[in-house]
């Protein structure tokens, strides 16, 4: 099976704003967001427990994805494995070279390189937990063994100053008790307003997302000076959803709210704002200089990344934001659980701050990644959020008030 582009095998539904691969929801994020997502988990749960959650979330999501693809295309073990190797590169994660269970090398790990860029130095521990989970989930699906039987360890990592990342597979007796989401029970809300525009925009966006280069990186050239190029990855949404669910189970309420709001804040600044200065941003935002309109258009970029359908109403001291069919809510509904997600808090906060405070639409300031993230605690402390979920519309809403 030929897989070259991150959009190969992907279907987009403009009415729901959802991207799927054979019914499994997927989404785009920039790799700086992915760094802060896993960083927030480790920060709250501790380094060892946090790394385990990220690894398990990736294993679970990719096991389900490749099990589905194996069944759908009637692939044997070898074909599933080979497809997974191509899939890994096509999603912007780097290039895998497997010579045996004791010798797996990962070239140009986007997570490792991003860690070094953001942290401005080398790491004391390996950081490719998403990639470890990917390999484990792929091999378990290909070999038709129960998830948890194979465990992948990283022995060398680019983030630690090593030339490449090295991993090995171990066989263990333990089993991973993963849930089985049933999306057939989820009522997706078809947002018909703007349907034609969303469909047309997606057809124009597709050619603007480049295939991975030889090292397996999807890099979109950006005028955003502190980025230069936007590195993006496409991952199953269940990776994020499962990790967030575990945060809610293991952390106290205040810590869980903080981490999930931080994730939404990082997502907008390092996915949306960096994409704003690319041809994709030119298409969706159009260089508007009106502050409120810029905030609305920036927020609506999520309509094309696999999050659902975004809507925002802006006023002078805050905003009312809404996401229909947000993947976090869909996942919890598929497990017959009441949706609890604070991602929208952070997304609304960052969108509002990007327009009102940093005025990113003027393209005059050079942003420091660390400076923007260090501002989060200040804005989080001054913001008031009122969140709700409307099951009849599968819509998560937040009313944000921010004292500037």
Image: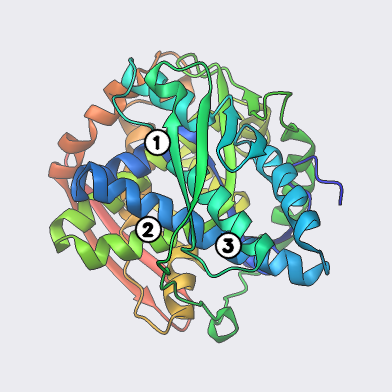
Assess whether mark 3 and mark 1 are in contact (beta carbons under 8 angstroms).
no
Quarter of the picture holding the C terminus: top left
Q: Looking at the image, is mark 1 or mark 3 earlier in the sequence?
A: 1
Q: Read off the residue under disc 1.
A: 35
- Residue 80 visible within the image: yes
Residue 73 to residue 269: above or below: below
Count neighbours of disc 3 (C-alpha within 10 A) and say few if under 14, some if 14 to 19, many if 20 or more: many
Q: Quadrant of residue 254?
A: bottom left
Of tags 1 and 3, which is closer to the observer? 3
Q: Read off the residue under disc 3.
A: 63
Tell me the tag on residue 243: 2
Query: Where's residue 2, x and y in %?
Result: 86, 47
Image point 73% across, 64% down: which residue? Answer: 69
Count neighbours of disc 2 (C-alpha within 10 A) and say few if under 14, some if 14 to 19, many if 20 or more: many
Q: Is residue 336 left or right of residue 404?
A: right
Q: Secondary structure at mark 2?
A: helix
Query: Where's residue 45, x and y in %?
Result: 20, 50
């Amino acid at each position: 099976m030929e897989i070259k582009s991150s959009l190969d095998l992907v279907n987009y539904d403009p009415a729901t704003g959802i991207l799927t691969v054979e019914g499994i929801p997927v989404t785009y994020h920039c790799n700086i967001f992915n760094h802060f997502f896993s960083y927030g988990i480790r920060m709250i749960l501790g380094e060892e427990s946090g790394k385990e959650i990220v690894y398990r979330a990736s294993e679970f999501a990719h096991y389900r994805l490749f099990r589905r693809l194996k069944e759908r295309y009637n692939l044997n073990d070898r074909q599933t494995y080979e497809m997974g190797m191509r899939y890994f590169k096509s999603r912007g994660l780097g290039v895998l070279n497997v010579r045996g269970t004791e010798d797996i090398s990962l070239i140009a790990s986007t997570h490792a390189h991003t860690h070094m860029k953001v942290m401005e130095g080398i790491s004391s521990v390996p950081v490719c937990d998403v990639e470890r989970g990917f390999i484990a989930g792929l091999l378990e699906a290909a070999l038709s063994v129960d998830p948890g039987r194979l465990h992948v360890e990283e022995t060398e990592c680019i983030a630690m100053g090593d030339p490449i990342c090295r991993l090995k597979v171990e066989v263990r007796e333990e089993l991973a008790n993963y849930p089985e989401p049933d999306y057939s029970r989820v009522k997706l809300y078809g947002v018909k307003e703007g349907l034609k525009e969303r469909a047309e925009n997606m057809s124009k966006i597709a050619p603007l997302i480049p295939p991975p280069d030889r090292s397996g990186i999807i890099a979109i050239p950006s005028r955003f000076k502190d980025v230069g190029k936007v590195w993006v990855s496409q991952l199953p949404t269940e990776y994020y959803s499962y990790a967030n669910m575990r945060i809610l189970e293991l952390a106290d309420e205040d810590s869980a709210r903080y981490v999930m709001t931080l994730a939404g804040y990082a997502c907008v600044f390092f996915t949306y704002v960096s994409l704003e200065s690319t041809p994709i941003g030119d298409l969706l935002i159009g260089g508007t200089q009106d502050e409120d309109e810029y905030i609305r258009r920036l927020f609506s970029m999520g309509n094309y990344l696999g999050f659902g359908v975004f809507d925002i109403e802006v006023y002078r001291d805050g905003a009312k934001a809404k996401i229909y069919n947000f993947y976090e809510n869909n996942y919890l509904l598929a497990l017959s659980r009441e949706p609890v997600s604070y991602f929208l808090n952070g997304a609304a906060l960052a969108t509002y701050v990007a327009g009102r405070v940093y005025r990113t639409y003027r393209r005059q300031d050079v942003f420091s990644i660390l400076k923007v993230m260090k501002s989060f605690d200040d804005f989080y402390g001054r913001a008031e959020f009122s969140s709700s979920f409307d099951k009849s519309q599968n819509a998560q809403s937040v009313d944000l008030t921010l004292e500037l």
